[in-house]
Amino acid sequence: MFTFVLSGGGSRGALQAGALKALIEAEYRPEMVVGTSIGAMNAAYLALYGPNERSIEALCQTWREAAQDPILSSNQAWVTARVFLHMPDRQYYYRLRDFLVSHDIDPELRFGDLEHCRLIVVATDLNHKSAALFGADPNDKVLDALLASAAIPPWIPPIESGDRLLTDGGFVSNLPIEPAIRQGATEIVALDLADERGLALAGRGLANIVIKVASTAAARQAYLEMALAEAARVPVRRIHLQAEEFTPVWDFSHTAEHIELGYEKTRAAIAEWKADGALAPWWRWWTPELWFERLKRVVDQRRAS
């Protein structure tokens, strides 16, 4: 199953919007999309409206609208202080919820209602110390899944749901390759928003230490998930989407340039893929030449192992 995997990364998700535009223009059509946090929201847009140029342009426009009124506060220190003083502010939860509902994520919309491609959303279940995968059950509600996957502390506190305590999916699988493979992915394009430059820029305060710990864990997870894909012989084309300068997850001021940069970086990556014949668009999968190339590549890999 040809799959797009979209990582978390807050405001840097605009890079993914541009990248998706390039992929769709090149006629890459996913059968499944798997996302964490902001990647889950981009993935949900594809599953809801379809992987086509019109929906991607609408996604980019949605990002431009979000940049006019950012959902997350840039005053991270104050938000964190309120958490430690047991004064959590739920305004960011409601702002995110209202934003999603205003963009057609109806509270009663279920994963089984999505017709264009399969959607899997990854959150973290703190009570069970595991990933929570929404969409494996078609009766799961899309809005609940997105709010859980994007419950990023300190802005949005964990969400109680039955015996689960759900928070941002990036804590267990920021680049959800392993969940994608578990759900049947056989070929993956992964759009990775991780930017380790933030580790060097973060200061020594408690909030910044938390950022460093989370970023370090995410980098280690991505390494292990790539290794798992290699062991499972699932080809992954991973595109690192980084701006020239590090952008914090709450900074939406670079949205327009991020969309364009994600588009250009992905067009360059696609040109390289075409050069080696890997992960061609669906309409090339049925040509005898490409089947021969794919078969030869599998045989060579097995001989090497």
Image (cartoon, rainbow, N blue to C red):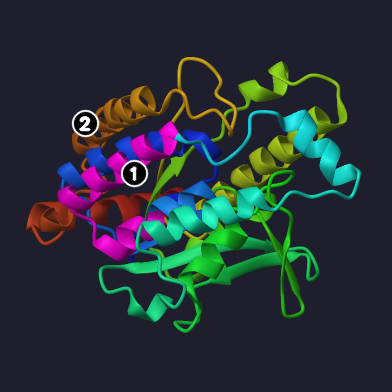
The residue that mark 1 highlights is 62
> Which of the 4 quarters of the picture holds residue 184?
bottom left
Q: Position of residue 116 (x, y in %)?
A: 25, 68
Residue 144 position by quadrant: bottom right
Asked whether residue 253 is in view, the answer is yes
Whether residue 60 appears in magenta in the rendering, the answer is yes
Other-residue count near label 2 (Cα within 10 Å), few / some / many at <14 / 14–19 / ≥20 = few
- Of helix, strand and loop, which one carries label 1? helix
In this orientation, which residue lies closer to the viewer: 78 or 139? 78
Labels 2 & 1 near each other (Cβ < 8 A): no
Q: State the residue in front, 114 or 183.
A: 114
Q: In this picture, is 18 found above or below 145?
A: above
Q: Position of residue 255 (x, y in %)?
A: 40, 29
Residue in the picture at 20% in, 48% down? 280
The mark closer to the camera, 2 or 1, is 1
Residue drawn where x is 61% and y is 43% of the image:
223
Please state the extent of the stretch shown in magenta in the rendering: 43-68
Which element is circle 2 on? helix
